[in-house]
Image (cartoon, coloured by chain):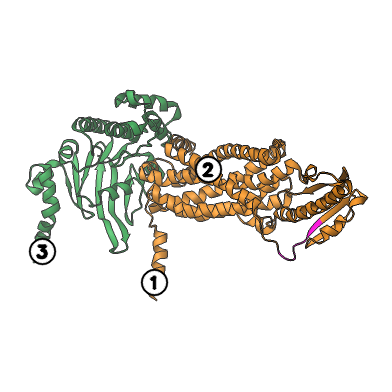
Amino acid sequence: MEEKIVIKNLTKEFYDEQRGAIKAVNDLSFTAYAGEIFGLLGPNGAGKTTTLRMMATLMKPNAGTISINGFDTDQDAQNVRKSMGFLSATTALYPRLSPREIITYFANLNGYPEENTKERVEELIKHFGITKYADTLSEKLSTGMKQITSIARTIVHDPPVLILDEPSSGLDVIVAQKIHEHIIDLKNQGKTIIFSSHNMGEVEKVCDRIGVINNGKLLTTGTLDELREITGKYYMEEIFIYLVQEYESVKQKELETAND
Amino acid sequence: MKTLITIYLKDLLRNKYTTMMVMLVPVLLYPMLYWGITQFLMVKTGLTDNQEINLSLDIRSDKFTSIKDSIATIHNFKTTETADENFNKEGIYLIVDEVDYLPYYTIHLDSTNSIQKQFFGKLKVKLSGYYDLQLGGRIDASDYDTDYFDTFWVVRHNIDGGDEAMTKILSILIPMMSIITIIAGIGTGAVELTAGHTEDKTTETTLTTALSRKSIILAKVFATNIYGLVAGIINFTFLTFVIMQIISVLMMQFTNKKLDFDWSVILNLRTLLLSLLSLAIISYMMSLIFVAAAGFAKTRKESNILITPFFMAFMIMSYVVIIPAIEPSLVISLVPVLNIAMVIKLLIVNDIQIVFFTETILFSLIWMFLLYKLLLPFMLEEEIILGNSNTSLIKQIKGRFAKWKKK
C-alpha cells in the first residue's frame, strides 16, 4: 500500500511562563496509507490538534519530520498544502461570503485550473445539496450547512490527502450521518483521510485504523479488531477509556517485570 | 494573491461593523475638529511687549493729518506713511479719507492673523475716538442735532481676499482630515483582517491553502491599504463638503457675503495627482504598521486597544501642520506623516518646492522599505499569524528583560 502520510519522531514544545517548556507532542510516529481513514483520538489536550496543525503546515515541529504525498512539510510546504485539504474544528468560513464564492475562491487559492473551476464548484454544490443556499451569506447559514460548505471548500481542489479535525462536532445526527457518508465516499475515491473526533461511535463506523494519543505520545495504533485484541474490550468507548487510563500503567508494569 | 485581496475587500465592504466605524468615527470626530480649529483661529493670544506690527498709513485728506499722533499712542505700532497702493501685506493698511467733512476709514488686514486682529481692536478704539472728536467739532461748529451723527463706520478688507483666506483654511484642514480619515479606514480594516479573521478562524484555513504566508500577509496589507484609502477619500470628500457648508453659513453670518470659492485653486489635476500619490504612500506605510500591530491580538477588542496609540500618534503628527512656524525643511521631510501632511498643505497653497517634494517621497519610500523589512518577520511569526501574542522573539526579549531585572 502506498504511504501517503509518514510522521516520524514528531515533537512540538510550547513555552509557558509558569511551567516553562511543555511538550504538546512527544516523539510521535505513525503512517497512513492511500485510500484509508486514519482516526486520531485522544482526550482534550492530548496533542491531536497540534499534530494536525503541524501536518497542515500551520506550525513547525521542534523535532521530527512529516511527509505528505511525498513532500516534506518543512522543505516543501507549498506542495504539501496543494496536496492536502484541511478542515478545522470550527467551520471557519468567511462570514460575509456565500458558499459559492467561498468554494470558488478556495479553488483559485489552491491553484485549481481556472477553466474547470466553475464546473467543479457547481458539481460540489449539487453533490452536497447546497444549491438552495449557494448564494446566501454563510453567516446566515445553519451550523450543518456551514460544515457541509466547509467540507466542499476543503476538497474543491481534489487533494489526495484530507485532514478533518472533528468534522461532525456540534451537528445533529442527520447532518452528521450525511457528513459520514461524504467522508466514506471520499475514501472510496482513493483519498487518505486523517479523522479526529471525540465521538467514538463515528470513529467505529468510519475509520479503518485508529491511533490513540495521550500527553503528546502515541499509545497505540491498529484496526478496530486489533485494538479489541490488545485491550480486551469490545466497544470503542471502552477501548479508548482503557487505553487512556490504564494502558500506560499496565505497559510500565510489564516493562518493570521484564527488567527484573 | 489577487483572489485573496478580492476576498478580503468583499469581506470588509459587506461588514456592517467596519462600514459603521469608518462612517461614524469621522462624523463624530470632524465636528469636534472643526470646532477646535475655529477656536484656534479665533483665540485671543496674549501679545508680548516687544510684539511689533507694521501699519501703513495713507491719509488722503489734509484735514485729518493729526490722526497719526492719535495712532502713535498705540504701543508697538510701527507706522509708515504711504500713498502706495502696493502696501506692505505683512501688516495693516489704513486709508483715511473724507466723506461729508468727516473721516472715513478703510482698513486692509489678514483676518486669519490673530495678532493683526488684536491690533485692529486697539486701532478701532483710536479711530473711533478720533472720529468722535472730529464729529464733536463739526456739531459744535454747525449747531447740529447730535443724534443725527451717530455713525462710525470702518470698511474692512481682507488683504488675502476670500479665495486666499479660504485656501489657507483648507490647506490646514485638508492634510489633517485626509490623513485622519485614511488612518480610521486603515485601522478598521487592519483590525478586521487580522484579529477579526483570527477570531473567525478564517486565517487558519487560508494558511492551509497553496499560498505562501508572505502572500497572505501582503494581501492583508494591500487590502487594508485599498480599503483605507478608498474609505478615507470617500469620507474626506463628504466631510469637506459638510465643513465647506458650515464655513459658508458662518461667512454669511459674519460678512453678509456668500462664499464664492474658486475650487480650481485646489481641484486641479496636479494637486490631485500629487496628493493622491503622497496619500497612497502614507497609507501603505500605515497599513504595514496597523496590520503588524493588530496582528498581535487574538480578538477585535484587543486589537483596537493595540492600534489606538498608533492612531493617536499619527493623528497628532498630522495636526502639526497647523503650526505656522513649521516650514518645509529636510528635517520635516524625514518625519513620516508630517512630511506628507506638509506636502499636501503646500500643494493646496501652490507653494510646493520640487526639492521638498522629492525629499519627502524619497524618505517615505525608504521608511516604507525599512518598515516592510522590520515588520514582515514579526508578521510571519507562527504564533502571531495564528493569533497568539507571545512570539518566540517576544519571549526572547522577555527572557532577556527578566535576566536583566534579576541582576
Q: CA distance from mark 2 to mark 3?
A: 73 Å
Q: Chain of mark 1?
A: B
- Bounds of the magenta segment: B48-54
Q: Give A120 or B19, whichever is nearer the viewer.
A: B19
- Residue pushed farthest bottom? B407
Q: Residue at x 22, y 52 (%)?
A: A46
Principal secondary structure, stretch drawn in magenta = loop
Q: Relative to residue B131, is residue A189 depicted above or below?
A: above
Q: Residue B52 colored magenta?
A: yes
Provide residue A233's location: percent of width, then percent of height.
7, 45
| Local secondary structure at mark 2 | helix
Q: Give A128 or A141, whichever is nearer the viewer.
A: A141
- Taking the image as drawn, is residue A75 in sight? no
Q: Residue at x 67, y 46 (%)?
A: B169
Mark 3 — residue?
A256
Q: Residue B312 colored magenta?
A: no
* Colour given to chain A in the rendered image: green
Q: Horizontally, is A104 left or right of B96 in the view?
A: left
* Colour given to chain B in the rendered image: orange
Q: CA distance from mark 2 to mark 1?
A: 46 Å
Quarter where residue A92 is shown: top left
